[in-house]
Image: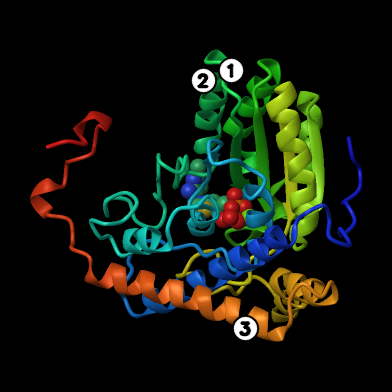
Amino acid sequence: MKTEPRAAATGKDGLSESELLGLYREMLLIRRFEEKTAEMYQMAKIGGFCHLNIGEEAAIVGTISALRAADYVYSNYREHGHALAKGVEARAVMAELYGKETGTSKGRGGSMHLFSAEHRFHGGYAIVGEALPIAVGTGYAIVYQDKPEVVMSIFGDGATNIGAFHESLNVAKLWKLPIVFVCINNQYGMGTAVSRASAVSEIWKKACAYDMTGERVDGMDVLAVRAVTDRLVSQARERREPSLLECVTYRYKGHSMSDPDTYRQKEEIKEWQGRDAILSLGNHLKQLKLAGDQDLERIDQEVTAEVEEAVKFAEESPEPDPRQLYRYVYADEEAG
Ligand SMILES: Cc1ncc(C[n+]2csc(CCOP(=O)(O)OP(=O)(O)O)c2C)c(N)n1
Ligand SMILES: [Mg+2]
């Protein structure tokens, strides 16, 4: 059991040049996607609740990039970036935010209910802590069928005060399920700071109650997140040992698009932005001479074009037919 946050990784961190550049690209794609989402929401192109990932990119990409395509991800309502990191196409995510037929959930879900069975991205849940027991069920299915897969269950700090969190960790440890529980500790659950909501502010310590591996990592350092996640995923896959990983990070924007964000100081936001994970990795790549300013600019142009294309696709896609409102309510209604 580690008691201290892991130090920032240095050098090439055991990752290849293309892997390092891939992490940068993925984080920047999420940043640009979310900026565009905010813009389109303000233009009323996107409706309903909408929670952005801006600021949390390193925690998302550092964890999900450690998985294989056949591994599963369960998330919550702040999941646009999680879906993108698991390989879901930007255009399908944007079309879902628009409520279009071409979206990941055929426009029936929206921002909080992205889902792609093909990418083993299993949602998208609006209720805090809702997906943890479902992730446990998938972990059990893997063991039952003796498959080599791993489940990553991602949730916020607030979810760790919910009963389902404790039941899930208990069963995962008891039955030795291949699950990595990832807590994105962004310091707040809506407007409430962690220290005002949780008796234990260092979330990783909650693993102790279940004799489970618990780790805390700097969630603004994608390489540190990736390094610890690699280890935890291996231990889940090879020894069926579950774990709890706390990524200490921050959301730059309000809880949702409708949050006036009056409960925290501007200085606090600025301080975290000063440690921005995308800028840090960019500088690291330059120091290693793996990329220059022009290369980083080109990546930015490419992901920006991908997001623009996603918006165009969503704009041009058809609305679902209102007469088919109840279609897809049950899994076997796919045809017809
Ligand atoms: C069971 C339940 N209680 C309350 C809510 C209302 N609610 C939505 S998001 C949220 C905050 C959760 O915070 P956290 O788990 O830290 O995730 P974050 O939004 O910070 O990513 C709350 C209380 C809910 N959706 N479900
Ligand atoms: Mg939170």
Q: Residue at x 76, y 52 (%)?
A: 225
> Within the image, what quadrant is residue 3 found in?
top right
Q: CA distance from mark 3 to mark 2?
A: 44 Å
Q: Are marks 3 and 2 in contact (CB under 8 Å)?
A: no
**Callout 3 crowding tier (Cα within 10 Å): few <14, some 14–19, many ≥20:** few
**Residue sitting nearer the eye, 169 or 90:** 90
Q: Position of residue 150 (x, y in %)?
A: 61, 32
Report the disc number at residue 141: 2
Q: Residue at x 28, y 60 (%)?
A: 99
Q: Are marks 1 and 2 in contact (CB under 8 Å)?
A: yes
What kind of element bears circle 1?
Answer: helix
Report the disc number at residue 297: 3
Is the N terminus in the top left, top right, bottom left or bottom right quadrant?
top right
Q: Residue at x 67, y 46 (%)?
A: 66
Q: Residue furthest left?
A: 323
Q: Position of residue 57 (x, y in %)?
A: 63, 63
> Within the image, what quadrant is residue 107 found in?
bottom left
Q: Position of residue 287 (x, y in %)?
A: 85, 76
Going from N to C along the chain, the mark reached first, 3 or 2, is 2
